[in-house]
Amino acid sequence: MSNSISKVPYPSNEPVLSYSPGSPEKEEVLKMYNSLYNNILEIPMRIGSKDVKTGDIENLSPPHDHNHIIGSYHKANKKNIEDAISTALNAKMAWSRMPWESRAAIFLKAADLIAGPYRSKINAATMIAQSKTIYQAEIDAACEFIDFLRFNVQYMQEIYQNQPESSSGIWNRLTFRPLEGFVYAVSPFNFTAIAGNLCASVAMMGNVVVWKPSDYQVYSANVLMEVFKEAGLPDGVINMVFGDPEMITNTVLKTKEFAGIHYTGSTSVFRDIWSKIGKNIKHYNSYPRIVGETGGKDFIIAHSSANSEEVATGIIRGAFEFQGQKCSAASRVYLPKSKADSIIEELKKELKTISIGSPANFKNFMTAMIHKSAFDRLVQAIEQIKKEKDIKIIAGGNYDDSKGYFIEPTVAVTTNPNYDTMKRELFGPLVTLYIYEDCNWKDTLNLVDKTSEYALTGAVYSKDRYALEEALTVLENSAGNFYINDKPTGAVVGQQPFGGARGSGTNDKAGSAYNLLRWVSPRLIKETFVPAVDYRYPFLG
Ligand code: NAD
């Protein structure tokens, strides 16, 4: 038994490897990519110690080559979900009583496994199944997930160290209990790191979890489970299930031990889940914790003092990396008339140099959309623009799904700041520009604030400090992550805790102590050393 006060290794951000020509990491990841690509993997669910196969199977294909099969996964029936819940609850006692240092050690080991022996596998799986370039896979599946694990261990220690004052004759202590019951984690397709963090952060704080990854992230989720197991996570702490999201969610939300949801995905699904929780509220043992990071309609606004090349680069990286499928991706841009021509010229020039295709070809900056319905959603928006009078495509606008779901990086200019694509989250490589008169800077800031229901990320480019101050004030509630002279994507754990409010989520800031605090229920213990023996206070005398 440990009777020391431990200090965890102080975290620093995992260095991003270059994958430059001839580098050993490039050779290794391509070897792994080819080996996974040319095999067919059968992926079971993981409930307790069991690999669960139901025979109800869905095939898996890379979005950039949708006729190629890389594997299949087994989908749950209602009984499997009930088993996952009872398995989690059975694992709860031992897990929640395990010393926190041992929990920390498991997740620190998981981080080191990904940094080392599993790096190429988690990256290759993410490249294949989610169509990420190696750079996008490396900053997500490897570096961001490693950072989530290492920084969260540090934050966990800081939370436990946070103790109340005591006064003479008494000792006050806080213990940070895991939630009573189990937590449901529901993750999106677009970040392997988010998927891993949604279940790992909760489990780290001593909770047990039923985790439902997106159908389009199952392949890399399976690698995460492999890592958790090798790191020594006891069976039953995280149970991974696949299948009909509505059936799974309804089964989970009907259980009285449901203690919270850790969700990332679209706004409409989160609102639906929240209202179901509301309807069931009398049924639960505790008020469930509801944490959700949801959609975005992220903006860039350039001031007339901004540098055109910097703005154009911010738009290209912010809007088109990972095909615009980041919740933080820039999709509406406001340009001052005096700079619009030079920014657009620079954009057009640079966009001509972008190549699109398989992530196995490292020359490609962009790859495919995640699935057919995402592809169709973007095609429909592009075709609609082609019919309208108040908006015009000035770059891109072509697409081809014969082999993979490929769409060109597309830029449209509108004279209507409330045009559909300025407001609706489309989650693809389409950015709409609106040009304002330089003298209308302040009005345009108000327009940015009022145009969309979301408030996730936003960026302002300006060399004028007064203009920046004005933007910070007017846009105070327009973005949870606000960038000055930088693109609105690419938050780094430990540096830019991530999340937004309004329709973008509960803003519990993934990758921070604020988030971990949602997964504990503090208990105050007051101990009096010499208790009173007479009820009378002196004033009664
Ligand atoms: P999605 O809403 O389609 O799916 C998210 C998860 O919800 C998946 O696991 C899915 O299976 C599940 N789901 C779908 N329908 C459901 C239902 N009826 N009941 C219960 N669960 C259901 O989202 P996606 O396409 O995987 O991801 C893209 C979305 O996620 C975008 O809106 C994006 O902005 C958002 N996102 C937000 C953040 C953030 O931090 N704010 C990060 C990543 C993604």
Image (cartoon, rainbow, N blue to C red):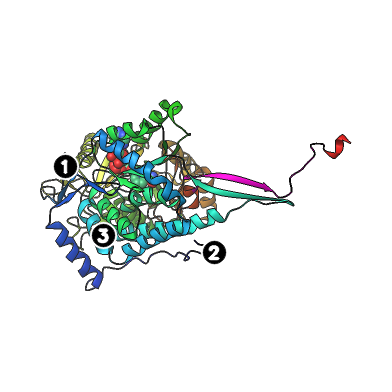
Left or right, 5 with respect to 324, comes to right
Give the magenta range: 517-536
Mark 3 = which residue?
123
Q: Find the distance from the CA under tag 2 to the CA under tag 3.
A: 38 Å
Return the residue found at the far right: 541
Q: Find the distance from the CA under tag 1 to the CA under tag 3.
A: 23 Å
- In this rendering, the label closer to the viewer, 2 or 1: 2
Look at the numbered disc 2 and give the secondary structure of its residue. loop
- Amino acid carrying label 1: it is Glu
User: Which quadrant of the figure shows ligand 1?
Assistant: top left
Given residues 85 and 262, the one toward you in this image is 85
- Amino acid carrying label 3: it is Asn
Say whether disc 1 or disc 3 marks the residue closer to the N-terminus.
1
Q: Is residue 94 above or below residue 290?
A: below
Mark sitting on residue 541 = none
Look at the numbered disc 1 and give the secondary structure of its residue. strand
Task: Identify which residue is drawn at 79% across, 36% down.
Answer: 535
Q: Is residue 4 above or below residue 472?
A: below
Does the residue tagged 2 have its C-beta within 8 Å of any atom of ligand 1? no
- In this rendering, the label closer to the viewer, 2 or 3: 2
Determine which quarter of the picture holds residue 244. Answer: top left
Q: Residues within 10 Å of mark 1 (few under 14, many from 20)?
A: some
- In this rendering, the label closer to the viewer, 1 or 3: 1
Say whether disc 2 or disc 1 marks the residue closer to the N-terminus.
2
Determine which quarter of the picture holds residue 253. Answer: top left
Mark sitting on residue 58 = 1
- Amino acid carrying label 2: it is Ser
Say whether disc 2 or disc 3 marks the residue closer to the N-terminus.
2
